[in-house]
Amino acid sequence: AYGEEAGRPFLSLNYFGYPLQVFRDELRYPPGAHADPWDAILLYNYIASQAQEPVAGRWIAYNSLPNSVSKAKTLARLEQKLADHFAGQAARLTQRIAELGGEIVAVGEDADVQAVFWPLPKVPLLLSFWDAEAEEGFSPQAHWLFDASVTHYLDLEAMLFLVEHLMERLMAD
């Protein structure tokens, strides 16, 4: 939604469940919301994309995107960090998902926990988590999938930033 305050136009949008006002030279967070100066880069790029693409409803892996090979290792490290953090704590992960407004789903995989987050309008993220199975020799795993329309809104670096930001919120105690 568009608005104006004291002659200054702004765009209102939801970011990680918080309503933000995005001015040309300022991000205005609601009271109590976590403010991060790096958000400005992500949000201005998101807005500058001017994308109108609808959510595709089809999940894709980061490494299936063009030119993602060098950055896919970063995402894999982030995924392992999340998996290790919640190893043996699937119930705690489910609790954190609910606290952050994620929706528990079952999307065709036999993951122990799956959830969809909407950190930005039209940019859903799917988290799949498999807990460790020590007796069978399986370590915990986590994977992030993106809606197939994501590249209309975010570049590869912004996608990683969004995942990392969401992970920080999930792992905060």
Image: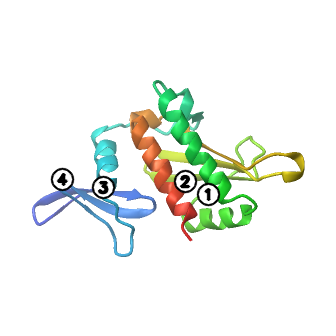
Q: Secondary structure at mark 4?
A: loop
Placement of the N terminus among the 4 image quadrants: bottom left
Image marks 4 and 3: residues in contact by CB distance under 8 Å:
no
- Report which residue position mark 1 lands on: 103
Query: Along the line of sight, which residue is nearer the eye, 66 or 79?
Result: 79
Image quadrant assignment for residue 67: top left
| Mark closer to the chain start, 1 or 4 | 4
Amino acid type, callout 2: Phe
Above or below 126: residue 90: below
Q: Which of label 2 and label 3 is nearer to you?
A: 2
Q: Can you tell which mark lies on residue 117? A: 2
State the image coordinates of residue 168 (x, y, percent, origin top left). Answer: 50, 59
Q: CA distance from mark 4 to mark 2?
A: 27 Å
The quadrant of the picture occupied by the C terminus is bottom right
Q: Are marks 1 and 2 in contact (CB under 8 Å)?
A: yes
Name the residue located 67 percent from the left edge and 54 percent from the top edge.
84
Residue type beneath disc 1: Glu
* Distance from the alpha carbon under mark 2 to that under mark 3: 21 Å
Residue 126: percent from left, percent from top: 60, 46
Label 3 to label 1: alpha-carbon separation: 24 Å
Answer with mark 3 or mark 1, whichever residue precedes in sequence: 3
What distance separates the C-alpha of mark 1 from that of mark 2? 7 Å
First-in-chain label (2 vs 3):
3
Vertical side of 37 occupied by 49: above or below: above
Asked which secondary structure carries label 3, the reply is loop
Quadrant of res 32: bottom left
- Label of residue 24 in the image: 4
Q: Secondary structure at mark 2?
A: strand
Foreground residue among 93 and 100: 93
